[in-house]
Image (spheres, rainbow, N blue to C red):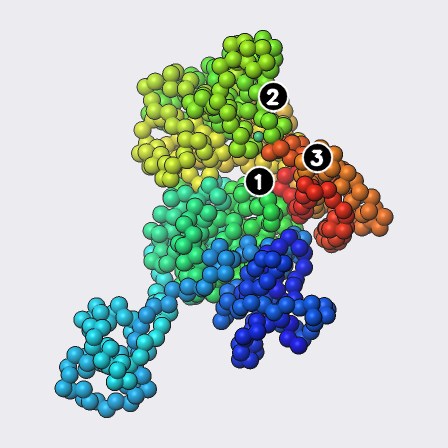
Amino acid sequence: MTVLQLALPTPLRRLFDYLPPADLGSEQLASLAPGQRLRVPFGRRELVGVLVAVRDGSDLPAEQLKPALALLDSAPVLAPDILRLCHWAADYYQHPVGEVFAAALPRHLRLGKARETGSIKAWQLSLRGKGLPAGALARSPKQAQALAALQGAAAVSAADLQQAGISTAVLRALQDKGLIERCLMAPAQHSASARAGLTLNEDQAAALGNIAKSGHGFACHLLEGVTGSGKTEVYLQLIAQCLQRARQALVLVPEIGLGPQTLARFAARFDAEIVVLHSGLAEGQRYRDWEAAAAGRAQIVIGTRSAIFTPLARLGLVVVDEEHDASYKQQDGFRYSARDLAVKRAQLADCPVVLGSATPSLESLHNALEGRYQHHRLPRRAGSAQLPALQALDVRHLPLEASLSEPLAARIEATLGSGQQVLLFLNRRGFAPSLQCHDCGWVAECNACDARLTVHLRQRRLRCHHCEASRPLPRACPECHSHQLLTSGVGTEQAEAHLRERFARWPVHRVDSDSMSNKGAMQTLSEEVNRGQPCILLGTQMLTKGHHFPGVTLVAVLDADGLLFSADFRGEERMAQLLTQVAGRAGRADNPGTVILQTHHPDHPALQSLLQLSYAEQARQLLQQRRELGLPPSGHLLMLRTDATNAEAGEQFLATLRQAFERAPVAQCQLIGPLPSPMPRRQGRYRSQLLVLAQVRPAARAAACRLVSLAEGLPRNSGLNWSIDVDPSET
Ligand code: ADP
Ligand code: ZN
Ligand code: ZN
C-alpha cells in the first residue's frame, strides 16, 4: 500500500498520511517526489499540503486513511535544499512543520493555484518537418521562409516569428501539413555581467581575497567593517565573481534598509536579472520573481527576512547585510532568525555565506572569535573619511526646549551657518508620549494595553503604539472635566515644530514612519539632502539604516537616557549598535563631524564605555560579561509565552508546565518564571512567560522538545494560546 506523508498547514506538530489520489496513473505514482503539492480533505475543509515522503505503509489502520483529492504539480515546487531547510527549521524552532512549509511557499502556490513557470508559446519542426528535403516548398516562399526560421533552432517563440514578419496564417498552414507543431519553451536565460568595480583599498582587498581563497564550498564569513568602510563594495565584487561562475547570489537586507540607494547601486553595477522580494510587492509580481529565482533566471535575488526561503537553482553565495538588525527575527507565528537560517541555507547549498555589519551581533562575533566563522575586518572608512567623535553633553540643570538644550542649539546654529547639515536622533514619534490632567492626575491610557497613549497633535488624536487603538484628542479631562491637559515628554512631531520656529531660515525634515509613509518619500528626501544645502534632519530609528548623509557634520542624540535604561539583557548591545549606526551616517573626508549625546547621566558606565571604546572593543567587553553570566551567546535561551483573555490563566498554565518539566528535569537547564511579560496586557490579552537558560546547545534542544511535548499534553482553557521562541531576541 502506497502512503503519502504530507506536511499540512495546521498548528499540529506532525505529518499526515493519505492515500494517493484515486485517479493517479501508475507512471505519476512512480514519479512522485518530495516537494510536490497535493490537495487533501481535512475535516470539513480542504488543504494544500506538501509531500514529504512516499512510504509503503502507515501506522494508522488502512480504513482510516483517506485518498488525497488531487496532485497539483508534475514536479516538486520546493527544491531538495529548501525541503531540508524547512525540516531543519521546524525541528530547531520546534514549530509545526506544515506551517514552516507554508511560510516557504509564495501565496499563489500556498492557495493551490497552478504553477506558472513563465513558459513561452513557441513553434518547432515536427518529425516530418525535420525530414523535409531542401527546396521542398519552393512554390510557397512564405512557408519556406517560416520553415527556414525554424530550422536553425530547437524552437522559436511565436513572438519572435511575428517579429520576423511570419504570419499566424502561414504557421497554421504548415501545421495543417504536419510540418511544424506548437510547443512551450523556457524563457531566455541571459548571461550576467558586471561593470568594473572600485579599486579596493588594502583592507577590502584582503577581505575579498581571503573570502575568495576559502573556496566555493560552505564557509561562514563575518565581515566586520565600520560604517562607510566599503562592505557593500566587497559584497558587489563577491557577487560579480559568483555570477562569473554562472551561479546565483542571494542578498538579505533589513526591512527598512532596502533603500532605493542600495538597489540603484546593484542595478548600476550589474547587467543581470535582479529581483527584489519584499512585503510591499504586489502578489503576482512577487510570485513571478520567485519563479525566476527558482528557475535560475534571476541571477541576483535581494530580499528581506522571508526571502531566505526562496529556491535558487544555482545558489552560489549568500550575503546578509547589517546582520545584527532586529528585523531578521520574525516576532510572531513561526519565530525564526533569517540570519541563522542563512548560515544553514549556505551549508545545505554548499556555498559561502557572508554576514556583514559595522556593529556585529554578539552571536556572530562570538562565532568569529571562537573560530567557527572566518573574521575579516575593515577598521577604516573607504576613501579617507574619518569617523566622527562622540561627546556627552550633561544637560542637568540646563533648560530644555522640546528636548533641546541651549549649548546644543548654539552648535546647530553654527553648523547650519557654516553651510553644513545636522542630524538629530529622537527615537519617539508623535508629539508627546503621554497626556495628563493637571488637576486630578488622570493619564490617557490604552484600553487594551498596559501602555500610555501617544499624543499626535497634527492628527488631533491619541494613538496606542502597541495596538491599532486610537481616539480623538479630548478637550477636557474625562474624570474631572478640567481643561488643564498637559503633555509630558517630547516626540519627533513636537521637536520638529520647535526646530522650525527656532531655525526658521533652514529646512527641517522629519523622518519617521508617520512622515515617511508614502512610497518614495524617503528616496525623494535623501536625494534632496544629498544635494548638500544646509538643513536639519530629525528622525527615529528610520534614519539609522541604509542611508549615508555625507553633508552631515553634527549629529545629536536628543535623549540618550531613553536608551540607557533597558530591562532586557541585550539593552546595552542594542544601544551601542544604534548609536554607532547613527554616528556612522555622518561625515566626509574633510570634515568627519561630531556626535553629541544629551544626557542626565554622564557617568553611567554604559555611556562611558560608549564614549571611550570603539564598538568592536565594547562588544568584546559585553561578550565577556555574557560569558560570566552564562547568557547568550555563551548560554542558550528559550522562551515559552502565553496570552489569554483571563489574567491568571497563562501563569497557571506555565506553572503546571514547569512542575511537569521538573519531574524529570533536563540537565544544565535553569527555568525562570512564570512571570508576567514586560508589557503584561496587550491588545486586550494578558501575557506571561517562562524562560529557560541552558548552558549548552544540546540541553536547550532537549528542553525545547520536552517543553513542547508537555505543553501539547496539558489541558488549557479556551482562549489561551502558547508559543515557543527559540533564541528569543526580546526577553
Ligand atoms: P559600507 O557598506 O561599509 O557602509 P560602502 O560600500 O557603502 O560602505 O562604501 C561607503 C562609501 O565609500 C561609498 O560612497 C562607496 O562608493 C565608497 N567606497 C567604497 N569602497 C571604495 C574604494 N575602494 N575606493 C573609493 N571609494 C570607495
Ligand atoms: Zn482631571
Ligand atoms: Zn493598545
Q: Which residue is mark 1?
A: 616
Task: Judge left or right: residue 441 versus residue 227.
Answer: right
Is 44 or 127 nearer to us in this picture?
A: 44
The residue positioned 57% from the left and 71% from the top of the image is 21
Residue 159 appears at what percent x and percent y?
26, 68
Near mark 2 (Cα within 10 A), the count class, few <14, some 14-19 or many ≥20, is some
Q: Are marks 2 and 1 in contact (CB under 8 Å)?
A: no
Query: What's the residue type where badge 1 is placed?
Result: Ala
Q: CA distance from mark 2 to mark 1?
A: 23 Å
Q: Which mark is on residue 646?
A: 3
The residue that mark 2 highlights is: 601
> Tag count in the figure?
3
Viewed as shown, does residue 334 lie left or right of 696? left
> Mark 2 or mark 1, which has the lower sequence index?
2
The verdict on label 2 being within 8 Å of ligand 3 is no
- Judging depth in this view, the residue of 217 and 345 nearest the camera is 345
Give residue 647's quadrant in the image: top right
The kind of residue on which mark 3 rests is Asn
Task: Return the residue nearer the eye: 367 or 13.
Answer: 13
When the figure is inspected, residue 486 is found, relative to residue 21, above or below; the finding is above
Amino acid, disc 2:
His
